[in-house]
Amino acid sequence: MDLRPFGGWRYSVSNFDDLIAPPYDVLSAADKQSLLERSKNNIVAIDMPHVPPVGEGPAEVYAAAARTLKQLQAQGVLKQDTKPAIYAYAQEFQWQGKTFCRRAILAGVRATKFGEDVIPHEHTFAGPKADRLQLTIHTKTQLSPIFGFFKGAQTVLAELWNSLQSRPADQQGVLRGVRERLWVVDDEQMIGKIASALRDKKVYIADGHHRYTTAMNYRDSLLEQGVIDANHESNYVLFALVERDDPGMLILPTHRVLHGLSASFSVDSLAACAKGFEWTNLPAGSFDFSDAAAVLARYGKHAMAVVADGGKDIRIAKFIKPELMKQAQPQQSEAWRELDVAILQHMLLEGPMDKWKGAEYKVEYTPDAQIVQTLCSGGAVGFIIQGTPIESVEAVANAGGAMPHKSTYFYPKLSTGVVLKSLQ
């Protein structure tokens, strides 16, 4: 990848608790209002002009967002760093009683077609891209980073983070229980070392496929118009780059709860018609929903839990017939067919479950197995799966495939508003 530093726009305060926000695509109108009540200058005033952001909104809302951005810059609420820099960004968080710290580098990465330096693993949809494109056209700014991971360069990264150990963060805050810290790194020698170490690396998109595609479309339109050249800032996309084996690179599973099933459904009837699974009945109260990952790991590869009756009826369903997945999905790669979420979708949720899906049928998603336990009553059934290993995400992407819907939940989300990257 071709990495380039930039002079970022940042809030001119040391604590940005009330100014940063989760990504636009996980926020509701109520979330936006709550953030603006904390501060009228919260980044959502710019980043989320149209709610819900699933399609293009009226032109005026994007123009208003651009006016707000210019106003905050003129007032000094946002200030631009005078020297090109990369930004060291740490997120410290807890999950199931354990503390993690994920460390990233915020920098510009030259936009290339998918499959060259940048590797996707999800499909994109027209509506969100239309919304993000209009926002980019009006603000001429990248407001939030693409979440990318790469493999290697541990030596130079260790040198960077060691150099920051005794240096207080330039900015910090807490958002939704996650401690966020940011350091400005404008030392040319260090930037050069990092850029050199990453030059032969590919970056895999963990989160932000729509925004990356938008950035490419925006850049391409300017190139076609002849108003920029290949060195213009629009050629570089704001990324948060994380080393693949970073201890804080946590991928949560996305469990499913099915609602609106017919009264004739039972786990016994599902087990009788589902093919390729080995079933184990568990005594009520024996499944630790607070550490479901550890429980399923004891049963090995492709083990998942089926939960009904408020958690009193629990079965372990272990898929043991990979040849059935090959028959069902011959067009997919072997790496894709090995995904637990793909097995769940195609060997249980589609086909076997179809006969019990009523008019009110819907699927609810959560990364928390304890929530599954509370939801799977009154005719609902829950499916608790193991998390997708990052190596599997990489393997599917390398094979040119796209992950099934709701396959990965990289936790926590990156925050918007930590650093803004101008495209002018």
Image (cartoon, helix red, strand yellow):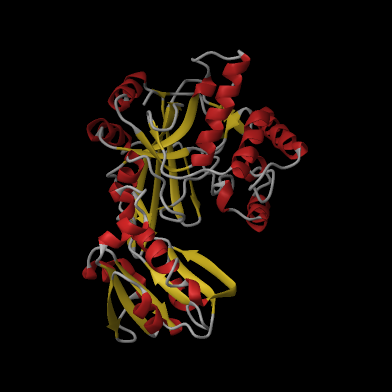
Task: Name the residue at 49% across, 64% down.
Answer: 365
Residue 43 seen? no
Instruction: List x then y, in percent, for residue 188.
Output: 36, 19
- For the residue pair 137 and 305, the one nearer the viewer reads as 305
- For the residue pair 211 and 240, the one nearer the viewer reads as 211
- For the residue pair 106 and 313, the one nearer the viewer reads as 313
Instruction: List x then y, in percent, for residue 40.
Output: 68, 46
Task: Name the residue at 36% across, 58% down.
Answer: 328
- The number of numbered discs placed on residues in the rendered structure image is 0
Quadrant where the C terminus is found in the figure: top right
Instruction: List x then y, in percent, for residue 370.
Output: 42, 73
Depicted 378 relative to depicted 305: above or below: below
Residue 60 falls left or right of residue 320: right
Task: Name the residue at 70% across, 37% down.
Answer: 65
- Residue 312 location, quadrant: bottom left
Residue 285 falls left or right of residue 39: left
- Residue 115 location, quadrant: top left
- For the residue pair 229 and 166, the one nearer the viewer reads as 229
Instruction: List x then y, in percent, for residue 323.
Output: 26, 60
Residue 46 seen? yes
Residue 141 falls left or right of residue 243: right
Quadrant where the N terminus is found in the figure: top left
